[in-house]
Image: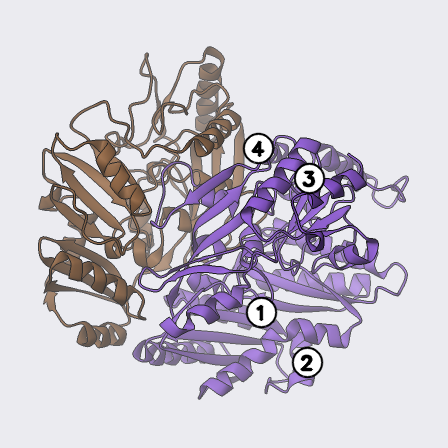
Chain colours: A brown, B purple
């Protein structure tokens, strides 16, 4: 295994010397996500070889695995012990790897209830842009020694380092899960979801689409049934199939040729007056928007910003629009300096997140 | 700039009572919760507004004056220890809750607001702010962000980093960064995580938006006594292995049990080698289920005595002993020194054995309280500062405990921070490459190194010197010289 790391190091060091950018790539399932990496020679650094689970002890609630490990293998190992990745990361393909999951930083339906990818990251081992082999954080739940570089890697799209190993907190799978379905208009659904989120109810996911509100309840059988009585609605058979279609974007809403925007905003924001079909998750905190060509990115981004959040052009059918929400100058300045510190030759996925980094 | 010029400059835009420089006025600021380290600052400033802080920072930046931020001063690692040639920036007067949005479950507060004051202010909505460090009655939210504070409920509800949404931060140059948002994520790098736990080294937090969560319908506690620490450790693993995430899971060793029982009469079993407190919270149905399962697991794990709280008063009484562990230590000993290592739980018994051996070796008693769910161990070394050499022996003993935590695959600090106190152990926990990256991160925000200089991350030079000292242990030359 050390031989693989040595090879990664050599590749990075050679690239740094010649200032030739590298595109770090795991399973390639999220190639669509982010801006194109500026690689004239299209040099791909394949990150799949360094794979496998290093340490997993269910009673410690911690798993450590190499970044090339397939998410499916990781989740299968957890499943065997009745545990899970509580942030329900989307795969977008069977080849999805742990490293890609961390770098993309995407969380699924359970996010509003359980936390996001970064909330579960405990430690990482990485190669920076100079090929230095570095470890941050650790395998324990609480650790405040040194700056939290591990969580800084989440959502950095590989621009600060090539992930080698990741330690994650895991949680037991809930004993029971049911899905409720009820009819409601959008404004009422947004209000209800937020009201319920402020009550001690075992709601583990919410989704609103086209007049229908879906709630998933998870936990002890007794708690789930008691909540069902309070909430009403009809029980959806095969609820997990529905949530998987939302998580993996195989739901029919996502089968559109239009561009897909992801607006992450204050959950109580009333229905957005933007033209285009929408699907809502996270108690109203996540609004997926299908937009036709005529609607400007500027309008969408202003709407998201006014609602306390940001907008990402998640899947695009036309090039030329920056994928991630623009940063204000002070924030961009910090981003540029951090990039310079971790990757002085600007060779790790340059441009994938922002053109400047 | 001379101290007098600096004071005059500060007084040109701050009211007289907000600039302290007479020795007797500076004295209350000479240390934080770690009173073994004391240093008077050159000047203390007590601004009330963000605009005033901007001016203070711009002045300090222009004159290259060090700035040490301070919240309530309850920190236990010397993170707010003043700098002799610097400004101590107290954020205590920024103590307003700016806005509460019960529907969105968030509150926007100034950094000097006390942790518990947030939960009190939102109690009417049946919401609360989850992280509950033991000092929550006094500690401020700004300090919690700086230290990434936890508490007894963090296995289930997370640390500060999991419970904040947005920060307003001023850089040393006085520029404002808006980090995070009212959304569950934000664009770009996760600076919210980087800022949390950064010990005042990267910027000055002027506003915090915290996440609020619903108060659980019910909470109930199982108290189990064990005649053997190993059995208690196994019981913790068995609870987690059964798929239960307790709201709180605390362990106390024999010496702690005796110290607090004498003090409080909480009803603890004095024959026990260890006591576990295991709390369940949630809906009434959920709690009833979980408490039954926890009870059965404690039985199977060999508990000698098990009690379940029958009402809220009893639950609070069971907790009272654990929460009084620190004052109890203060009662049985003139001084105590609190450590904060975290270990993978499976090594608990081994580490406790090691601490016991060290305790005999150094001739100092040590009480152990343990956030058992998340592996965070708080050994309290009992000593008497008036006995010559005892503080030094205590510090050495503490250092050994931390090194043992590192060797067990853990960390030197779970929630108290590195500050001034654990700066040497950072050299053991991290290699040169990592320390270099920490300095690089620091330099990205504060290239001149003016914010809280000398804390949190040791210089490579210091580590090199220490390394050499370890080789020649016992024959250190020039022991009287300060080492930076």
Label 4 sits on residue: B437
Label 2 vs label 1, nearer the camera: 1
Badge 3 marks a residue whose secondary structure is loop
Report the chain holding disc 3: B
10 Å crowding of disc 4: few (<14), some (14-19), many (20+): some
Work out whether mark 1 precedes mark 4 in sequence or the reverse, and give the earlier one. 1
Seen in the picture, residue A340 relative to A243 is either above or below; the reply is above
Q: Quadrant of the N terminus of chain A?
A: top left
Q: Are marks 3 and 1 in contact (CB under 8 Å)?
A: no
10 Å crowding of disc 1: few (<14), some (14-19), many (20+): few
Residue B23: x and y in percent read: 83, 54
Q: Quadrant of the C terminus of chain A?
A: top left
Badge 2 marks a residue whose secondary structure is helix
Work out whether mark 3 precedes mark 1 in sequence or the reverse, and give the earlier one. 1
Mark 4 to mark 2 CA distance (whole Å): 45 Å
Label 1 sits on residue: B137
Badge 1 marks a residue whose secondary structure is loop
Q: Are marks 2 and 1 in contact (CB under 8 Å)?
A: no
Label 2 sits on residue: B258
Residue B467: x and y in percent read: 75, 37
User: Is residue A271 left or right of B407 when viewed as pictured?
Assistant: left
Residue B84, located in which quarter of the rendered image?
Answer: top right
Tell me how many marks there are.
4
């Amino acid at each position: 295994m050390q031989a693989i790391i040595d090879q990664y190091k050599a590749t990075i060091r050679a690239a740094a010397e010649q200032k030739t950018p590298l595109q770090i790539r795991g399973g390639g399932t999220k190639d669509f996500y982010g801006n194109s990496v500026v690689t004239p020679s299209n040099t791909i650094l394949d990150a799949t070889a360094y794979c496998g689970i290093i340490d997993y002890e269910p009673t410690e609630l911690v798993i450590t695995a190499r970044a090339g490990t397939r998410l499916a293998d990781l989740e299968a190992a957890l499943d065997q012990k009745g545990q899970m990745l509580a942030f329900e990361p989307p795969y977008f393909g069977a080849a999805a790897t742990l490293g890609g999951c961390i770098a993309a930083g995407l969380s699924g339906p359970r996010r509003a209830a359980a936390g996001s990818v970064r909330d579960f990251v405990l430690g990482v081992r990485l190669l920076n842009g100079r090929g230095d082999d570095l470890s941050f954080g650790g395998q324990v739940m609480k650790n405040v020694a040194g700056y939290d570089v591990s969580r800084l890697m989440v959502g950095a799209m590989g621009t600060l380092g090539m992930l080698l190993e990741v330690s994650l907190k895991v949680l037991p799978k809930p004993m029971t899960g049911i899905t409720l379905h009820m009819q409601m208009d959008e404004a009422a659904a947004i209000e209800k979801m937020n009201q319920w989120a402020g009550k001690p109810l075992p709601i583990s996911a919410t989704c609103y689409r086209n007049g229908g509100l879906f709630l998933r309840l998870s936990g002890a059988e007794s708690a789930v049934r008691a909540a069902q009585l309070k909430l009403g609605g009809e029980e959806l058979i095969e609820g997990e199939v529905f949530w998987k279609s939302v998580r993996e974007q195989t739901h029919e809403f996502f089968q559109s040729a239009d561009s897909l925007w992801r607006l992450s905003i204050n959950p109580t924001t009333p229905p957005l007056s933007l033209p285009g079909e929408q699907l809502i998750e996270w108690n109203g905190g996540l609004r997926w928007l299908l937009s036709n060509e005529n609607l400007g990115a500027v309008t969408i981004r202003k709407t998201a910003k006014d609602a306390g959040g940001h907008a990402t052009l998640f899947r695009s059918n036309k090039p030329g629009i920056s994928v991630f929400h623009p940063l204000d100058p002070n924030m961009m300045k910090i981003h540029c300096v951090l990039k310079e510190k971790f990757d002085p030759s600007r060779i790790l996925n340059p441009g994938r997140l922002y053109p400047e980094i | 700039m001379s101290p007098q010029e600096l004071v005059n400059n500060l007084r040109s835009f701050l009211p007289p009572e907000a600039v302290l420089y007479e020795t007797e006025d500076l004295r209350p600021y000479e240390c934080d919760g770690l009173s073994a380290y004391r240093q008077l600052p050159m000047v203390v400033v007590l601004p009330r507004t963000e605009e005033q802080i901007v001016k203070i920072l711009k002045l300090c930046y222009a004159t290259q004056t060090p700035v040490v931020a301070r919240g309530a001063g309850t920190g236990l690692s010397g993170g707010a220890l003043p700098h002799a040639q610097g400004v101590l920036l107290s954020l205590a007067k920024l103590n307003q809750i700016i806005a509460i949005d019960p529907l969105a479950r968030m509150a926007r507060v100034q950094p000097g607001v006390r942790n518990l004051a947030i939960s009190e202010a939102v109690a009417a909505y049946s919401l609360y702010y989850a992280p509950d460090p033991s000092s929550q009655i006094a500690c401020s939210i700004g300090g919690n962000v700086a230290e990434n504070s936890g508490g007894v409920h963090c296995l289930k509800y997370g640390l500060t980093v999991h419970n904040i949404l947005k920060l307003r931060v001023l850089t040393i140059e006085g520029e404002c960064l808006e980090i995070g948002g009212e959304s569950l994520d934000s664009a770009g790098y996760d600076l919210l995580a980087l800022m949390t736990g950064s010990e005042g080294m990267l910027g000055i937090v002027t506003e915090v938006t915290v996440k609020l969560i619903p108060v659980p319908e019910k909470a109930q506690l199982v108290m189990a006594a064990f005649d053997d620490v190993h059995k208690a450790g196994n019981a913790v693993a068995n609870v987690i292995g059964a798929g239960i995430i307790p709201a709180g899971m605390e362990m106390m060793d024999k010496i702690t049990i005796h110290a607090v029982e004498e003090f409080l009469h909480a009803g603890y079993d004095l024959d026990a080698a260890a006591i576990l407190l295991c709390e369940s919270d949630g809906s009434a149905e959920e709690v009833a289920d979980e408490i039954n399962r926890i009870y059965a697991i404690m039985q199977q794990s060999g508990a000698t005595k098990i009690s379940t709280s029958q009402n809220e008063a009893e639950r609070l009484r069971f907790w009272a002993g654990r929460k009084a562990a620190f004052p109890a230590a203060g009662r049985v000993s003139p001084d105590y020194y609190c450590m904060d290592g975290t270990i993978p739980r499976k090594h608990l018994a081994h580490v406790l054995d090691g601490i016991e051996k060290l305790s005999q070796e150094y001739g100092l008693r040590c009480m152990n309280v343990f956030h058992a769910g998340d592996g965070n161990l708080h050994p309290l070394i009992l000593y008497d500062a008036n006995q010559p050499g005892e503080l030094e022996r205590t510090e050495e003993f503490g250092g050994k405990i931390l090194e043992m935590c590192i060797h067990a695959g853990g960390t030197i600090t779970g929630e108290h921070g590195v500050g001034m106190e654990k700066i040497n152990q950072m050299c053991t926990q991290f290699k040169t490459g990592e320390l270099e990256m920490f300095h690089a991160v620091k330099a990205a925000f504060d290239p001149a190194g003016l914010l809280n200089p000398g804390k949190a991350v040791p210089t490579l030079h210091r580590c090199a010197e220490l390394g050499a000292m370890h080789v020649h242990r016992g024959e250190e030359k020039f022991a009287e010289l300060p080492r930076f």
